[in-house]
Amino acid sequence: MNIPSTIIAGDTPSWVDSSFTDGLGASVDSSAYTLTYSLRGADAAAKLDLQGAPSGSGWQFSLAAAASAALNTSGQAARWYWAARAAKGGTVLTAGEGTLLVKPNLAALTTFDGRSQAEQILSTVEAAILARSTGDFVTDYTIGSRSLKKEPMSALLALRDKYRLIVSRERKGQAIKNGLGNPTRLGVRFRP
């Protein structure tokens, strides 16, 4: 299936899926079958069904700008699950399934926090360490019948180190994905 793995909300993605064969080797093509993508999100009301238009022996799909914008209204990347099913009369075949990441349209936002969840947690832990090191040394206290116990500094430092490693791995992976190579690998050239 050729559905994009990532789209930007508000874009108009289109793709063509080729004909294929079923488990018995019979051809599944647009002359006899309809192909429909069902997209589902975490929200119960979040659903979209797209039926393909015949294109040669395959099917062509287009997602309108308003429909793709509706797939991401939170301002954060949203993961959708899809299944493509071919149908002819009473015969239904699942042609494929997977996930689709819908990134926010930055032009439609006034602010955007593009940090990963690990980067956000690291920032919060570092702020807690800073608060403790500048005078908030109380780790637990009780007022009446209520009590509060904070993590000890050693646990915060261990958590910070854990998330620094996770963030470092994420950034390294993103650099490699962007074609910048592995930032921790050093190339050496010897001249004669």
Image: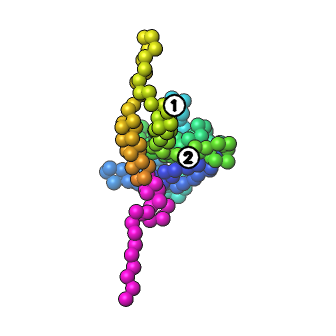
The residue positioned 37% from the left and 82% from the top of the image is 190
Which residue has dot 2 on it? 114
**Between disc 2 and disc 1, whose residue precedes?**
1
Which residues are drawn in magenta?
A: 170-192
Query: Looking at the magenta stretch, what is its main secondary structure?
Result: loop
- Label 2 with label 1: CB-CB less than 8 Å: no
Residue 153 in picture, x, y percent from top left? 39, 36
Above or below, 83 relative to 146: below
Above or below, 28 relative to 81: below
Foreground pick, 76 / 126:
126
Q: Determine whether the residue tagged by mark 2 lies in a helix, strand or loop.
A: loop
Which residue has dot 1 on it? 43
Distance from Cα at disc 2 to Cα at disc 1: 22 Å
Residue 186 visible in this rendered orientation of the protein: yes
Quadrant of residue 89 within the rendered picture? top left
The residue positioned 64% from the left and 47% from the top of the image is 106
Crowd around label 2: few <14 · some 14–19 · many ≥20 (10 Å): few
**Does 46 appear in magenta?**
no
Where the C terminus falls, by quadrant? Answer: bottom left
Foreground pick, 67 / 120:
120
